C-alpha cells in the first residue's frame, strides 16, 4: 500500500493498515528520532507517534508525514 492509501485506510479504522504502517516505519522513525534524542527516548517518541496516529486517526492529514509528527514529538521532550 502507498502511504496515502495507508492513511486513508487508517482513517477508516483499518487495524491491518495501522499494523503495516507500524512495521514499515518503526525502524526509520526511530533512527530519525535518534538524531534529536538520546537512548530510549527515541523509541518512546516513536511509540507515542503511533499511539497518537491511532487515537487521532479520523483527523489525520494525508499530506503530513510521520517524520513531521515525530519531529514535533521530539521537540516536546
Image (cartoon, rainbow, N blue to C red):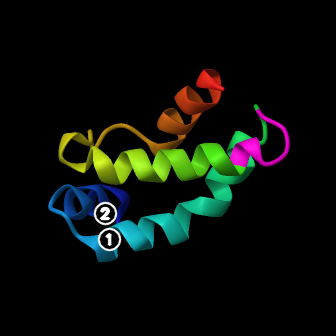
Mark sitting on residue 32: none
What residue did someone put label 1 on?
17
Horizontal and vertical percent for residue 14? 23, 70
Residue visible at 35% across and 65% down?
2
Residue visible at 50% across and 33% down?
68
Is residue 40 part of the magenta span, yes or no?
Answer: yes
| Left or right of residue 43: residue 4 | left
**Of label 1 and label 2, which has the lower sequence position?**
2
- Image quarter where the N terminus lies is bottom left
Residue 1 in view (yes/no): no
Horizontal and vertical percent for residue 12? 14, 61
Residue visible at 46% across and 53% down?
50
Horizontal and vertical percent for residue 16? 32, 77
What residue did someone put label 2 on?
6
Residue visible at 69% across and 51% down?
43
CA gap, disc 1 to disc 2?
6 Å
Q: Secondary structure at mark 2?
A: helix
Q: Are marks 1 and 2 in contact (CB under 8 Å)?
A: yes
- Image quarter where the C terminus lies is top right
| Left or right of residue 76: residue 34 | right
For residue 27, which quarter of the picture? bottom right
Q: Nearer the viewer, residue 16 or 8?
A: 16
Label 1 CA crowd tier, 10 Å (few <14, some 14–19, many 20+): many
Q: What is the magenta range?
A: 37-42
Residue 67 in view (yes/no): yes
Amino acid at each position: 500500500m502507498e502511504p496515502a492509501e495507508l492513511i486513508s485506510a487508517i482513517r477508516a479504522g483499518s487495524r491491518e493498515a495501522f499494523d503495516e504502517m507500524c512495521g514499515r516505519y518503526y525502524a526509520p522513525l526511530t533512527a530519525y528520532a535518534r538524531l534529536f534524542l538520546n537512548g530510549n527516548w527515541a523509541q518512546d517518541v516513536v511509540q507515542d507517534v503511533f499511539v497518537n496516529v491511532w487515537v487521532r486517526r479520523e483527523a489525520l492529514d494525508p499530506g503530513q508525514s510521520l517524520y513531521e509528527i515525530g519531529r514535533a514529538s521530539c521537540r516536546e521532550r
